Image (tube, rainbow, N blue to C red):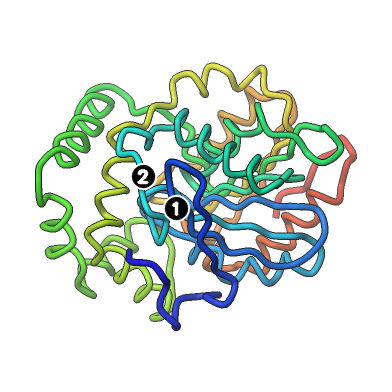
Amino acid sequence: MRWPPPSDWPNVSLSRQIHAPPHRWHVQETGAGPCLLMLHGAGGSVHSFRDMLGALAAHYRVIAIDLPGQGFTRLGARHRCGLDPMAQDIEKLCQQEGWQPRAIIGHSAGSALALKLSQTLRTAEGEVPQVVGINPALDTFDGIAGVLFPAIAKMLAAIPFSASVFSATSATPSRIETLLRGTGSVLDAGGRALYQRLVADRDHVDGTLLMMSQWSLDALVRSLPALETRTLFIIGLRDGAVPPRVARDAASRMADARVIEFPDHGHLVHEEVADDIARHVSAFLGDRSSEGTQPR
């Protein structure tokens, strides 16, 4: 999507562009206090945190970024859309800007990025940042799907005009309705319209396809038992994109991870009930005990 964001984009007054090679990043920042870094999932943008930003800004300095090639972040290197290089580039951005996040909040694939970054970023006190994963996508594909889906994404990313064709055929209200219905979440008309605008943008779709084609979780999944970060997973039990068992299985393998479940919501639970999610995040970050957060 072309810079600058339009005047009606969510929280556009908080937007700024930062050049941290190789990308030109779109960042939204608000609030004061300990730093929280927010990372959206594949195909999303900072818009997905539109209602959480204000709720968390009462006590935190909240920074949300568009991932490379998605939303309004201008992609500077097409080969740096996989998990490791993307985490490296976000770490460079944080170092350049002096961001030392107390916690990293990720949605879906953004949760994998959050966990990866927790291995290298440190808080202002030199501690490992905490992680909140919302419907975390932390599972590798099983069987033939693990071969076909990445291969299809790579093929589409390599074919000229494939992103344009996808945008042209998918950016209709009925198609967006179908795509969102598959997430198990119910959004209002405004929320649906924002996704329609993203899907209609050829550059955004291209960036999403590149991320899908280069994504690999194998090393991160193997490292879960060794991760030191204190982690909260928030899941919607109606999630049609990432099975709820993924977060439960990941938490069971980690040293300090717990799960909160929302039975009536889906993959976009943070957009459906943003205030509730923000309250759970604040409670988790303020609770340093080992007893954990009780499920909803």
Q: In which quarter of the image is residue 14?
A: bottom right
Give the quarter of the image for residue 13: bottom right
User: Disc number at residue 76?
Assistant: 2
Label 2 residue SS? loop
Question: Would residue 44 be found to the left or right of residue 150 on screen?
Answer: right
- Decide: is 75 above or below 12: above
Within-10-Å neighbours for mark 1: few <14, some 14–19, many 20+: many
The answer to which of 8 and 194 lies nearer the viewer is 8
Question: Residue drawn 47% across and 28% down?
Answer: 84
Classify 83 as above or below 282: above
- Residue 153 coordinates in the image, percent (x, y): 22, 38
Residue 295, x across and y down, in percent: 71, 49
Residue at 59% across / 37% down in the picture? Answer: 91
Q: In this view, does 241 lie to the left or right of 40?
A: left
Residue 264 higher or lower than 148, as above or below = below
Of callouts 1 and 2, the N-terminal one? 1
> Considering the image in quadrants, where does the C terminus appear?
bottom right
Measured in 3D between alpha carbons, the distance from the residue under mark 1 to the one under mark 2, in whole angstroms, is: 7 Å
What is the secondary structure assignment of the residue under circle 1?
strand
Q: How many labels does the image show?
A: 2
Which mark is on residue 106? Answer: none
Number of the label disc, if any, that sits on residue 24: 1
Residue toward you, 183 or 108: 108
Q: Please report contact status of discs 1 and 2: CB closer than 8 Å, yes or no.
A: yes
Residue nearest the viewer, comparing 168 with 24:
24
Residue 90, image x and y in percent?
54, 41
Give the quarter of the figure containing the N terminus: bottom left
Q: Classify residue 276 as left or right of residue 14.
A: right
Q: Residue 216 in the image: x percent, y percent?
A: 39, 27
Q: Looking at the picture, tell me which residue is in the foreground, 188 or 296.
A: 188
The amino acid pointed to by label 1 is Arg
Residue at (25% x, 31% y) in the render? 150
